[in-house]
Amino acid sequence: ATLIRREDYCAPAFWIRTVDLTFDLDPAKTLVTSKMQLERNAAVAHGALRLHGEELNVLRVLINGESVSFRQEGHELIIDNVPDADFALEIRNTCAPDKNTALSGLYTSGGSFFTQCEAEGFRRITYFLDRPDVMAIYTVLLRADKAKFPVLLSNGNLLDSGDLDNGRHFAKWHDPFPKPSYLFALVAGDLVAREQRVRTRAGKDHLLQVFVRRGDLEKTEHAMNSLIASIVWDEARFGLPLDLERFMVVGVSDFNMGAMENKGLNIFNTSALLASPATATDADFARIESIVAHEYFHNWTGNRVTCRDWFQLSLKEGLTVFRDQEFSMDMAGGASARAVCRIQDVRALRASQFPEDSGAMAHPVRPDTFVEINNFYTPTVYEKGSEVVRMYQTLVGRAGFEKGLKLYFERHDGQAVTCDDFAAAIAAANPGSALSTRLDNFKRWYSQAGTPRVQARGVYDAAAQTYTLTLKQHNPATPGQEHKLPQVIPVALGLLSAEGQALPLQLQGEDQAAGLERVIVLDEAEQSFVFTNLASQPVPSLLRGFSAPVVLDDGLSDADLLVLLQHDADAFNRWEASQRLALNRILAAVRSGSALQLDSAFIEAMRAVLRHPELDAAFKDLALTLPGEGYIAEQLEVVDPQAIHAAVEAARSQLAQALREDWIEAFEANQIQGGYTPDPVSSGKRALANLALSMLVLDAARSGDTVWPGRAYQRFKDAGNMTERLGALSALVNAHAELAEPALARFHELFKDDALVIDKWFALQGRTPELDGKSFARVKQLTQHPDFTLKNPNRARSLISSLCMFNPAAFHRADAAGYVFWAEQVLALDAINPQIASRLARAMDRWTTLAQPYRSAALEAIRRVAAKPDLSSDVREVIDRALE
Ligand code: B3K
Ligand code: ZN
């Protein structure tokens, strides 16, 4: 395995202008004929033609119709004698889709053919310059048995189709847009489609199709609606239209990630596509909407303008996540629903990206090196990348950002470019802005890994009526980056009076106040900002809406946090105050090693939120949900997962008990009559009702009450939708109630034929809060269940990742059994699917922060994996970095 460096980038020695692919599809052995038109890159001196290829069997190589000699070295096919003038290259090879368990390249799933080419899967189909800066125009001829594979799809527009001899048929596709090989796709199988015609603003008609297996058609309505909404939104918000006559979406059960944005032929994990009220939760509906949108938005941010090299991955991913987050917010509606979206996004960032930024795999948004690019489709590249794009918007304003994006497309449509090109376009469109005047320093967000720490302290001068806010930033060292420079950090803020009144914001030197909220920019190690005309000591509300991806220490007292919780105009900071109040108490208990005892001030504050007449149910649910155990671990230098779990469980059970009457009321008040719709208001009510029910069942376990477990079981049986059914089941399972067993059995019986629902059944058991080792024992036992298999990524994740990545107290065991289990599963998975194995391997990213005996046991397990000589480069990179 070799380390690839960003600074070593060289333009390709050849361009491939057009490619004509012919596939004779056969699951055991598929024949691929590739005819390419090549041209030397004049900017690069002579050199052999080196094509990428993996797991292929080459049959012949022709240049301008003549057979030519070639060599094979590792994963390269090398032709030394290449004409100087443009030439035609023809390669014929075979590959074995049925044997492809890595699900990269061409593979079969449920008897149909699918491809996944990003990042480097195309080279597992045929020899090619498999790099994103080589963009070609593709024509694709597919031939296959008509009875088994009635549907034949590839990118672009259908040119021709018809019957052949021997029961075979063909389809010919042409994509008019030049694209890199990672955006190539083909699908062949027995599929059916939901179809819809739409007309865009320019008056053009388009055909939209969602292909799935027979029987799944009624579960595609939500995806189709999401696609239509995405098309409308991208035209309205950014002026970006659909550019193909036909836009296809296909579902597949075996898939390594959520979905893939192949030009005109998006391929989806069925878990990110199929939904019906009976089988999918509100969270599934929301996730599908955002993933359908994400892949669609890639058509411009990723496909029309793509990445020059894989180090620039965030150019398309950070930007496209930003766009799908904005879309979800716009779809959600009012200010409160938008804030709920933002809170959920930030919670996800803190749960996954913050730990990554402080662990063994920490890397900048634009990494400098990698061994296996598939290891860098990370929360840092995606979610932190999106926060970086959001900061551009914060610094230049919404209109300025739209102008910047417009210039980006004017400059780069049809090109493969870099993050620098993006930054330059946004800045050039906004001369003199807070961004453009600091562009070089702002770009440190791309090069420096690690989460900045910002400390804020305010001093009030009663005589001068001023409030001096001093901000300091500290950028912690990360592997390979000892010393860092200050980041450009936009801090959105407001000031409140002790009574909760929003105060006008006037900085020293200004003639008048500039509103009740503004953005100040911290771009040095330490800066002070003096606010004037303040009659009394204010309470600062900082980093509103999470205006930068940093850890903030604002030193606020409980009293200040209570003012924010009750009065802040910024709903995000209201939620943040609730989390901080809880976090402070949990951390105090963990740090002191004493049992957690919630005080009445906290309980009354939570009661007030729960009973608040104006707050939305969705907000209440988020405010009353305690911080996750992973996020709590992030705040500690030495992590004892069992101590954290004990503190969280104590806090939960005390909240359950102290607010029992309020939970009952919340449960009753948030019942929904009538049909199911996954809109934000109904989803919020169901979320709060589910939380209330889980608290009531939890409290019953303490008090011996049998009424609420009985009601939960009844609700589980009678539920009209999956959100309520799974909510009731989870309440029973997570409380280790007696009725959990019959409910789990019944659930399995009801849904045994629906793989996506059975995934939920496994995941729920994989994530059950630990009690006396029962949860861990159950997971081990479930690996023997007839429905369990490591071969399907969704199933493997549902059980194994649930335990190892999302159930810290069940995983981190004093007897090391969790780590032994992890090592076994990583090794077993690596033989099947390195990408999935490698993601599981990352469960040990933060092992060095563990307390003893966990730390030593974890190291032993990591060494055990490291000792396997033939590890994939995917897992090897993760394990090596953990041991560095
Ligand atoms: N671009 C793909 C991810 C490909 C992952 C390759 N290991 C999905 C997305 O981000 O939209
Ligand atoms: Zn993406």
Image (cartoon, grey):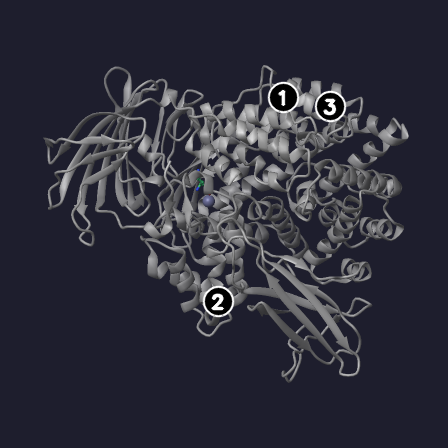
Would you say 567 lies left or right of 289 here? right
Q: Which percent across, then down, holds residue 790? A: 52, 22
Mark 2 CB within 8 Å of ligand 2: no
Would you say 443 lies left or right of 655 here? left
Task: Tell me the mark number nearer the camera, choosing from 3 and 1.
Answer: 3
Quarter of the image where one finds residue 642: top right
Q: Amino acid at mark 3?
A: Lys
Residue position for label 3: 774
Would you say 376 lies left or right of 477 here? left
Quarter of the image where one finds residue 24: top left
Q: Is residue 517 among what the camera can see?
A: no
| Viewer-closest of 177 and 720 | 177
Q: Which percent across, then down, holds residue 482? A: 52, 55
Q: Secondary structure at mark 3?
A: helix
For the residues bearing labels 2 and 3, Cβ distance under 8 angstroms = no
x 44%, y 66%: residue: 440
Gap between marks 2 and 3, in whole Å? 55 Å
Quadrant of the rendered image holding ligand 1: top left
Q: Is residue 291 above or below residue 447?
A: above
For the residues bearing labels 3 and 1, Cβ distance under 8 angstroms = no
Q: Which percent across, then down, holds residue 313? A: 42, 48
Q: Which of the labelled discs sits on residue 400, or is there none?
A: 2
- The N terminus: image quadrant: top left
Q: Amino acid at mark 1?
A: Phe
